[in-house]
Amino acid sequence: MATAAVEAQATHVDVLIVGAGISGIGSAYHLQEQCPGKSYVILEMKDTFGGTWETHKYPGVRSDSDLYTFGYRFKPWVGTPIASAQAILDYMGEVITENGIDQHIRYGTRITACNWDSKTNLWTVEATAKGGQKVTYTCNFLWMCQGYYDHEKPYIPEWPGMDKYKGQLIHAQLWDPKTDYKGKRVLVIGSGATAATVIPEFAKEAAHVTMLQRSPTYFYCSENKNELADRLREIGIDEPTIHRVVRAQIMHDQDVLTRRAIEEPDAVFEDLKALIRAFTGVEDFPFEPHFTPKYRPWQQRLAFCPEGDIFRAAVAGKLTVVTDTLETFTEKGVRTGSGEEIEADIIVAATGFNLLMMGGIPFSVDGRPVDWHETVNYRGMMFTGVPNMCWVMGYFRASWTLRVDMMGDFVCNLLNHMDKIGAKRIDVALRDEDKDMPLSDWIEAENFNPGYLMRGLKLMPKRGDKPEWRHNQDYWAERNEIPNIDLSGDEFLYDGQRSKARAKVAEPA
Ligand SMILES: Cc1cc2nc3c(=O)[nH]c(=O)nc-3n(C[C@H](O)[C@H](O)[C@H](O)COP(=O)(O)OP(=O)(O)OC[C@H]3O[C@@H](n4cnc5c(N)ncnc54)[C@H](O)[C@@H]3O)c2cc1C
């Protein structure tokens, strides 16, 4: 709770941004541009910026989306569409220095609590700085950009016999780049985007790679280039224009693909197969049983596969795929459900994340702990019962950053609107017409169902059945909806009142 004593020692800012990943840096940029009078700070627990792109260090770590759309709308991307983690960090570094954002970041500062006090209309944010020193900030508005998963503890199932294994077992998220895999037998457990990235890299130098998957994944094979961008460059078009045009092209094509995946999933799968045949040059490439998923394309992210590299590794005999359950670890490797022994010197668990709601930071409102599962989520951005706070949760099927830019506009509009009407507090609240609305889990499993979300649904807020109370994961709908949100709508309470009630009070008698 924000006591007078705490506030006396606290540093105050108008806006406090949590996290210096791609969301936090983008949000800071928009705040500076659109609310130039606001003071702000970014608190980041790591010693540097980058978030996801700093955490992951496994071989070949790269984006899955193209950087024309994963890059910010305000800074042109000039490299290959799919970029290495280092190229993304370089790009973010440029955004930070070009815009003087560095002076606002406090590295090595781990937030340990966020407490709202309705008497002062302030958040008190407690944190531990380098050397264990406790620091306290107060702020009027909290902009949560802490990502969605635990950066320190990845998801690794408890398999029987793990302690028996004599080789090296490591989760991809904790990969140490000094690990030597040259000439060794590597087993990768998992088949998602991470597996798709590391396997072709391992295949270059390892003695052999085996991928053990419980079930198959869809792969999208493509060259790592954008012909339109290359052509526009060749004819001398400026980079900001290329960025804008290529973003539009990619978003259009993704929209078409998403709709086709829903309307004609079999035809889309045939197209994906045709690409694999083209990149491997193998007309009768065997898709059964290892490359025929059970779910619809697009119920989970498509794993990108530059130049068909993972399939080419399989065709070259460097990769064996096993589709089976993992029964137990053994001294030399693992045994599968059907009794197959797979020996390996190194086992890499590419088994995904642990979802972490709000970075695991405990929140309270007027001394009452916040249980996120008890809140209803406003468009995947704000929560009932939690004032003056927004949460950046990007897209799963389109580039995350598209939403960072869009939310940047929304939050800045909201802050400017509050200043204009003299409001100190903003809440979202169910309207009269929402009172009987059925509430359900945050995301429909039928729509999008990766393991980390399904495992963590009870940590997530609730969803209603109206556009205002869902994060519909649909960029193409939101790009029209979010810029047109009516900030005087009844879902917004300013200082506890609806806009209409405030206007009546303000009207001269
Ligand atoms: C390997 C990998 C590849 C991916 N590829 C893509 C892709 O190609 N396209 C795409 O759209 N998405 C991709 N994603 C999803 C990706 O995580 C997001 O797109 C995006 O990078 C998330 O950025 P963020 O800034 O919101 O969160 P993060 O990158 O998670 O950054 C959050 C930051 O907040 C900090 N933080 C957390 N808690 C605290 C605390 N208590 N105190 C202080 N600081 C805190 C963290 O240290 C971190 O720096 C990928 C994810 C992974 C893991």
Image (cartoon, helix red, strand yellow):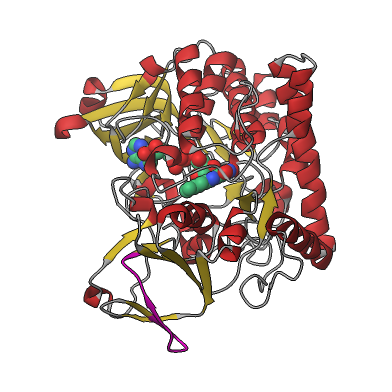
In front of the other: 24 or 330: 330
Identity of the residue furthest to the bottom in this view = 339
| Horizontal and vertical percent position of residue 220 | 68, 54
**Quick check: 162 above or below 29?**
below
| Horizontal and vertical percent position of residue 357 | 43, 51
| Horizontal and vertical percent position of residue 135 | 23, 29
- The quadrant the C terminus occupies is top right
Give the extent of the magenta segment. 335-346
Q: Residue at x 35, y 54 (%)?
A: 182
Could you tell whether 37 is left or right of 378 in the image? left
**Quick check: 477 above or below 20?**
below
Q: Was residue 52 drawn as part of the magenta stretch in this picture?
A: no
In front of the other: 139 or 49: 49
Q: Residue at x 34, y 29 (%)?
A: 48
Q: Residue at x 68, y 44 (%)?
A: 223
Q: Is residue 153 visible?
A: yes
Q: Was residue 341 drawn as part of the magenta stretch in this picture?
A: yes
**Quick check: 367 above or below 320?**
above
In front of the other: 181 or 502: 181
| Horizontal and vertical percent position of residue 292 | 67, 72
Q: How many marks?
A: 0
Q: Is residue 99 visible?
A: no
